[in-house]
Amino acid sequence: MDESGLMREQEVGEVTHYWTALGVAGVHLDKPVDVGDKIHILGHTSDFEQTLSSMELDHHRITHADAGIDIGIQVSEHAREHDKVYRLLDTAEMAEGETEL
């Protein structure tokens, strides 16, 4: 959290599909993500945070996904097409981002 008590977020992708029976969202990534990252899914009617606990590429479990690919992620709530996916940044990442500017 920063001084205002809010965590900073970085947009990493967009939901392209949701499989209700599986509780899985298809996500097109613009930035890389890793299992264990804290994410925030936000849309017109979606707004929830969770730890990224499971993701797949072509039906194979992966722990890291690069930008530019489509993955499936297990989600704790219903996600919808066009919802934005954000990665919550920890203090060290926020400090790195400030020095890179």
Image: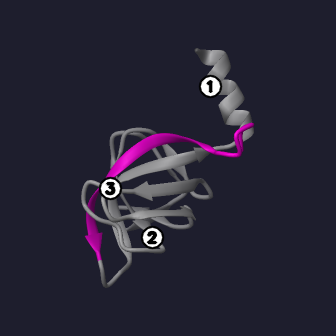
Q: CA distance from mark 3 to mark 1?
A: 24 Å
Mark 2 or 3: in front is 3
The disc placed on residue 97 is: 1
The answer to which of marks 2 and 3 sits earlier in the sequence is 2
Region of the chain picked out in magenta, as a range: 1-19
Residue beneath label 2, please?
Answer: 75
Residue beneath label 3, please?
Answer: 83
Between 32 and 4, the residue placed more toward the observer is 4
Q: Residue 26 in the image: state x and y as whole percent.
A: 31, 61
Q: Is residue 2 magenta?
A: yes
Between 57 and 93, the residue placed more toward the observer is 93
Q: Secondary structure at mark 3?
A: loop
The answer to which of marks 3 and 1 sits earlier in the sequence is 3
Q: CA distance from mark 2 to mark 3?
A: 13 Å
The answer to which of marks 2 and 1 sits earlier in the sequence is 2
- Residue kind at label 1, given as amino acid type: Gly
Tell me the chief SS of the magenta region.
strand
76 in relation to 9, above or below: below
Between 58 and 35, the residue placed more toward the observer is 35
